Amino acid sequence: MIIKTKKLRCTRYFNLIFFLLLLICCEKKEIRKKTFSENLSSALNLKNYKIDTVKINDSITQLKGQNAQFKISGKLLNGKQIGWWTINEKNTDSRINAQYIMIAKNKNFLNQYIVYANNRLLKLGSKFYLTKLSDGKISYIFNMPTKPATKIVMNNFYYGFDLKSKIPVHPRRENNAYYIDVKIPPNAKRIKGYFVQAEKVPSGYALNSIYTVDSIK
Protein backbone atom coordinates (compact mmCIF):
# COMPACT_ATOMS: atom_id res chain seq x y z
CA MET A 1 0.00 0.00 0.00
CA ILE A 2 2.87 2.40 0.74
CA ILE A 3 4.38 1.82 -2.70
CA LYS A 4 1.06 2.49 -4.44
CA THR A 5 0.61 5.75 -2.51
CA LYS A 6 4.06 6.94 -3.57
CA LYS A 7 3.35 6.05 -7.21
CA LEU A 8 0.05 7.91 -7.05
CA ARG A 9 1.72 10.99 -5.59
CA CYS A 10 4.45 10.88 -8.24
CA THR A 11 1.88 10.54 -11.02
CA ARG A 12 -0.07 13.53 -9.71
CA TYR A 13 3.16 15.53 -9.37
CA PHE A 14 4.27 14.84 -12.95
CA ASN A 15 0.77 15.57 -14.27
CA LEU A 16 0.85 18.95 -12.50
CA ILE A 17 4.29 19.77 -13.93
CA PHE A 18 3.14 18.79 -17.43
CA PHE A 19 0.03 20.97 -17.13
CA LEU A 20 2.07 24.00 -15.98
CA LEU A 21 4.56 23.55 -18.82
CA LEU A 22 1.70 23.31 -21.29
CA LEU A 23 0.24 26.58 -20.02
CA ILE A 24 3.61 28.33 -20.27
CA CYS A 25 4.17 27.10 -23.82
CA CYS A 26 0.70 28.19 -24.90
CA GLU A 27 1.21 31.59 -23.29
CA LYS A 28 4.53 32.06 -25.10
CA LYS A 29 2.97 31.10 -28.44
CA GLU A 30 0.18 33.60 -27.84
CA ILE A 31 2.69 36.36 -27.06
CA ARG A 32 4.66 35.57 -30.21
CA LYS A 33 1.52 35.99 -32.30
CA LYS A 34 1.07 39.60 -31.17
CA THR A 35 3.00 42.15 -33.21
CA PHE A 36 2.89 45.94 -33.23
CA SER A 37 0.76 45.94 -36.38
CA GLU A 38 -1.89 43.93 -34.53
CA ASN A 39 -1.78 46.09 -31.38
CA LEU A 40 -1.24 49.60 -32.68
CA SER A 41 -2.35 51.44 -29.54
CA SER A 42 0.13 49.51 -27.41
CA ALA A 43 2.99 50.17 -29.85
CA LEU A 44 2.23 53.92 -29.81
CA ASN A 45 1.69 54.17 -26.04
CA LEU A 46 4.68 56.03 -24.61
CA LYS A 47 4.11 54.42 -21.21
CA ASN A 48 5.43 51.18 -22.70
CA TYR A 49 8.87 52.69 -23.41
CA LYS A 50 11.94 53.92 -21.62
CA ILE A 51 12.23 57.41 -23.10
CA ASP A 52 14.72 60.25 -23.56
CA THR A 53 13.62 63.78 -24.41
CA VAL A 54 15.26 66.93 -25.77
CA LYS A 55 13.50 70.28 -25.38
CA ILE A 56 13.39 72.15 -28.71
CA ASN A 57 11.43 75.18 -27.47
CA ASP A 58 8.74 76.02 -24.90
CA SER A 59 6.12 73.96 -26.78
CA ILE A 60 7.95 71.24 -28.73
CA THR A 61 9.93 68.29 -27.37
CA GLN A 62 11.84 65.68 -29.37
CA LEU A 63 11.36 62.16 -27.98
CA LYS A 64 13.09 58.83 -28.47
CA GLY A 65 12.24 55.62 -26.67
CA GLN A 66 12.70 51.88 -26.70
CA ASN A 67 11.63 48.68 -25.01
CA ALA A 68 12.55 45.04 -25.48
CA GLN A 69 10.84 44.86 -28.88
CA PHE A 70 10.50 48.34 -30.41
CA LYS A 71 12.09 51.76 -30.90
CA ILE A 72 9.95 54.90 -31.20
CA SER A 73 10.70 58.52 -32.13
CA GLY A 74 8.70 61.68 -32.74
CA LYS A 75 7.72 65.09 -31.37
CA LEU A 76 5.45 66.29 -28.57
CA LEU A 77 3.49 69.54 -28.70
CA ASN A 78 2.65 70.66 -25.17
CA GLY A 79 2.95 67.04 -24.07
CA LYS A 80 0.82 65.61 -26.91
CA GLN A 81 2.12 63.45 -29.74
CA ILE A 82 2.11 65.47 -32.99
CA GLY A 83 3.32 65.07 -36.56
CA TRP A 84 4.83 61.90 -37.98
CA TRP A 85 6.16 59.22 -35.62
CA THR A 86 8.23 56.15 -36.44
CA ILE A 87 8.10 52.81 -34.62
CA ASN A 88 10.68 50.21 -35.65
CA GLU A 89 10.61 46.59 -34.59
CA LYS A 90 14.07 45.50 -33.45
CA ASN A 91 15.96 42.92 -35.53
CA THR A 92 13.39 43.06 -38.36
CA ASP A 93 12.48 45.27 -41.33
CA SER A 94 9.02 45.98 -39.89
CA ARG A 95 7.87 49.46 -38.91
CA ILE A 96 4.96 51.87 -38.52
CA ASN A 97 4.80 55.48 -39.67
CA ALA A 98 2.03 57.24 -37.75
CA GLN A 99 0.69 60.79 -38.08
CA TYR A 100 -0.92 62.72 -35.22
CA ILE A 101 -2.77 66.00 -35.77
CA MET A 102 -4.43 68.44 -33.38
CA ILE A 103 -8.21 68.58 -33.83
CA ALA A 104 -8.95 70.71 -30.76
CA LYS A 105 -7.07 72.50 -28.01
CA ASN A 106 -4.97 69.91 -26.17
CA LYS A 107 -6.60 67.08 -28.15
CA ASN A 108 -4.67 65.09 -30.75
CA PHE A 109 -5.90 62.47 -33.21
CA LEU A 110 -4.20 59.48 -34.86
CA ASN A 111 -4.91 60.55 -38.44
CA GLN A 112 -2.81 58.13 -40.50
CA TYR A 113 -0.72 55.02 -39.89
CA ILE A 114 1.23 53.04 -42.47
CA VAL A 115 2.37 49.54 -41.54
CA TYR A 116 5.30 47.74 -43.17
CA ALA A 117 6.22 44.10 -42.54
CA ASN A 118 9.62 43.08 -43.91
CA ASN A 119 9.59 46.34 -45.92
CA ARG A 120 6.27 45.42 -47.56
CA LEU A 121 3.27 47.71 -47.19
CA LEU A 122 0.36 46.06 -45.37
CA LYS A 123 -2.66 47.83 -46.84
CA LEU A 124 -5.20 45.89 -44.77
CA GLY A 125 -3.48 47.09 -41.60
CA SER A 126 -2.95 50.71 -42.65
CA LYS A 127 -4.94 53.95 -42.75
CA PHE A 128 -3.66 56.68 -45.06
CA TYR A 129 -4.47 58.80 -48.09
CA LEU A 130 -2.69 59.77 -51.31
CA THR A 131 -3.27 62.68 -53.70
CA LYS A 132 -2.39 63.53 -57.28
CA LEU A 133 -2.83 66.85 -59.09
CA SER A 134 -3.57 66.75 -62.83
CA ASP A 135 -5.79 68.41 -65.49
CA GLY A 136 -7.49 70.85 -63.13
CA LYS A 137 -8.43 68.24 -60.54
CA ILE A 138 -7.09 66.60 -57.41
CA SER A 139 -7.46 62.81 -57.12
CA TYR A 140 -7.69 61.12 -53.72
CA ILE A 141 -7.12 57.52 -52.67
CA PHE A 142 -8.17 56.67 -49.11
CA ASN A 143 -6.81 53.36 -47.84
CA MET A 144 -8.70 52.08 -44.81
CA PRO A 145 -7.88 49.10 -42.52
CA THR A 146 -11.02 47.28 -43.63
CA LYS A 147 -11.33 43.72 -44.88
CA PRO A 148 -13.19 43.39 -48.20
CA ALA A 149 -16.02 41.42 -46.57
CA THR A 150 -16.70 44.11 -43.94
CA LYS A 151 -20.20 45.59 -44.17
CA ILE A 152 -19.79 49.31 -44.85
CA VAL A 153 -22.94 51.31 -44.20
CA MET A 154 -21.57 54.78 -45.06
CA ASN A 155 -18.55 56.46 -46.63
CA ASN A 156 -18.37 60.16 -47.46
CA PHE A 157 -15.75 62.79 -48.20
CA TYR A 158 -16.46 66.37 -47.17
CA TYR A 159 -14.23 69.04 -48.68
CA GLY A 160 -13.91 72.77 -49.15
CA PHE A 161 -11.53 75.25 -50.78
CA ASP A 162 -9.93 78.14 -48.87
CA LEU A 163 -12.16 77.96 -45.76
CA LYS A 164 -15.41 77.69 -47.72
CA SER A 165 -18.18 75.33 -46.60
CA LYS A 166 -17.52 71.64 -47.13
CA ILE A 167 -19.22 69.71 -49.95
CA PRO A 168 -20.16 66.04 -49.39
CA VAL A 169 -19.32 63.44 -52.05
CA HIS A 170 -19.55 59.65 -52.17
CA PRO A 171 -16.24 57.99 -53.17
CA ARG A 172 -15.99 54.86 -55.30
CA ARG A 173 -14.91 51.79 -53.33
CA GLU A 174 -12.59 48.98 -54.45
CA ASN A 175 -11.87 46.52 -51.64
CA ASN A 176 -10.38 48.60 -48.80
CA ALA A 177 -9.60 51.67 -50.95
CA TYR A 178 -11.79 54.64 -51.88
CA TYR A 179 -11.34 56.89 -54.92
CA ILE A 180 -12.59 60.41 -55.60
CA ASP A 181 -11.74 63.17 -58.11
CA VAL A 182 -12.40 66.79 -57.15
CA LYS A 183 -12.39 69.65 -59.67
CA ILE A 184 -10.25 72.61 -58.66
CA PRO A 185 -11.91 76.04 -59.05
CA PRO A 186 -9.90 79.01 -60.41
CA ASN A 187 -7.56 80.71 -57.92
CA ALA A 188 -7.98 78.02 -55.26
CA LYS A 189 -4.90 77.67 -53.07
CA ARG A 190 -5.81 75.02 -50.53
CA ILE A 191 -8.30 72.21 -50.03
CA LYS A 192 -9.31 70.79 -46.66
CA GLY A 193 -11.34 67.63 -46.26
CA TYR A 194 -12.68 64.95 -43.95
CA PHE A 195 -13.20 61.34 -45.03
CA VAL A 196 -15.40 59.16 -42.82
CA GLN A 197 -16.34 55.49 -43.04
CA ALA A 198 -18.91 53.67 -40.91
CA GLU A 199 -18.92 49.90 -40.62
CA LYS A 200 -21.28 47.47 -38.92
CA VAL A 201 -19.87 45.75 -35.86
CA PRO A 202 -21.56 43.45 -33.30
CA SER A 203 -21.92 46.30 -30.80
CA GLY A 204 -23.33 48.78 -33.33
CA TYR A 205 -21.27 50.95 -35.68
CA ALA A 206 -17.57 51.87 -35.82
CA LEU A 207 -16.26 55.06 -37.42
CA ASN A 208 -12.94 55.44 -39.21
CA SER A 209 -11.87 58.86 -40.43
CA ILE A 210 -9.03 60.87 -42.01
CA TYR A 211 -8.56 64.64 -42.06
CA THR A 212 -6.88 66.11 -45.15
CA VAL A 213 -5.11 69.42 -45.83
CA ASP A 214 -3.42 69.93 -49.20
CA SER A 215 -1.95 72.88 -51.04
CA ILE A 216 -2.92 73.47 -54.68
CA LYS A 217 -0.32 75.01 -56.96
Image: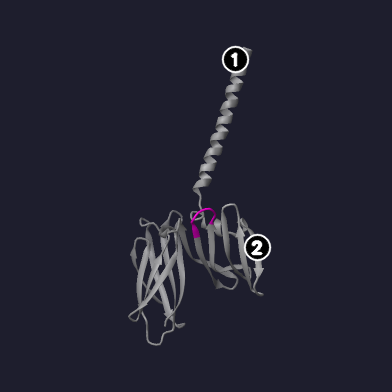
Closer to us: 156 or 217: 217
The percent position of residue 198, horizontal first and vertical second, equals 42, 63
Rendered position, 203 above or below 2: below
Residue position for label 2: 52
Which quadrant of the view contains residue 77? bottom right
The percent position of residue 45, horizontal first and vertical second, equals 58, 59
Per the image, is 90 magenta?
A: yes
Rendered position, 15 above or below 96: above
148 sits to left or right of 40: left
Marks 1 and 2, how far apart at CA: 62 Å
Closer to us: 109 or 98: 98
Closer to us: 1 or 200: 1
Query: Residue at image x 58%, y 26%?
Result: 14
Q: Disc count in the image?
A: 2
Rendered position, 68 above or below 83: above
Q: Quadrant of the C terminus?
A: bottom left
At mark 1, the secondary structure is helix
Image disc number at residue 4:
1
Query: Residue at image x 42%, y 76%?
Result: 159
Query: Residue at image x 40%, y 87%?
Result: 187
Closer to us: 86 or 112: 86
The percent position of residue 36, horizontal first and vertical second, equals 51, 55
Report the magenta residues as a range. 89-95
